[in-house]
Amino acid sequence: MITGAPLRAILFDVGGPIVDERPDYLNSSVVVRQLIQEELGRDVSEQEIEEARQQAIVSWSPSFTKSVLWYFLKPNVVKTQELYDEAIKQIFTHRDDVTLMEGIEEIIPKLAVDYKLALAGNQPEFMKGKLVRTGLLEHFSSTVLSVDLGIQKPDSRFFLEICDRIDTPPENCCMIGDRLDNDIYPANVLGMRTIWVQIGPHAVQHPRIPEDVPDAIVEHMLDVHKIIREWEIGEG
């Protein structure tokens, strides 16, 4: 939420703002469906998987992959976690590189001139090497992910830990993410500015309460730079 505090740092969710996960969306459905079918010993339709995924999204589940598995495997907690770990491994290792969001290679170096940049994603360790190969991480002051911290979004401690690592209070930070539940709400309640990248499966989310409302909404990453410059002008 915009306050009088000057902007000093920008936190980026990985999937959505930096990495275009849409090419991997269909593959993740195939992986999850196959694991469920093998466990249940019966056919599970693509429609069933998609219906479970949409239910997870509208219920604001922190992980729709885990939620879909739980939908079919409950009440087996152990098996759900076991298949979730295997699903994440397959989803994030099925190709060596990532598809970057259009414009991200242009705006990251520009923003790094004036602001500290930090990753703020729930991605597993598999993602770190892929991001290193893009060359973008050289512009970031903090590159830890949830796997490094042992804390996942939307836990507010996740954001506070990153703020501590870049030595910047939350009120001087902006969070950019593609989810109202995992990215915008927890950042808002800490006093951060927020930009919602309204793309991907979570673009259908609607604010439940005022604290879910982002300070700005974009559909293209190039618009992020424009918004931040407008904020600068307003502070000047």
Image (cartoon, rainbow, N blue to C red):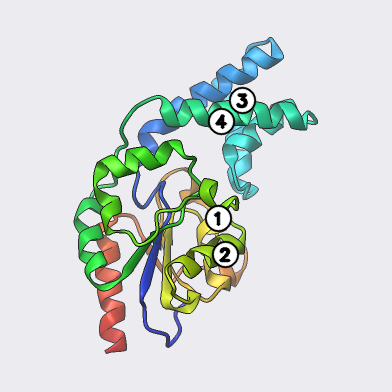
Question: Marks 3 and 2, how far apart in space?
Answer: 31 Å
Q: What's the amino acid at mark 2?
A: Pro
Label placed on residue 132: none
Residue 95 visible (yes or no): yes
Residue 45 visible (yes or no): no
Question: Marks 4 and 2, how far apart in space?
Answer: 27 Å
**Mark closer to the chain start, 4 or 1:** 4
Helix, strand or loop at mark 1: helix
**Mark closer to the chain start, 1 or 3:** 3
Please name the residue that numbered disc 2 is placed on: 186
Q: Pointer 1 and pointer 3: residues touching (CB < 8 Å)?
A: no
Tell me: 105 left or right of 34: left
Position of the C terminus by quadrant:
bottom left
Between 24 and 202, the residue placed more toward the observer is 24
Q: Pointer 4 and pointer 3: residues touching (CB < 8 Å)?
A: yes
Please name the residue that numbered disc 3 is placed on: 48
Residue 140 sits in which quadrant?
A: bottom left
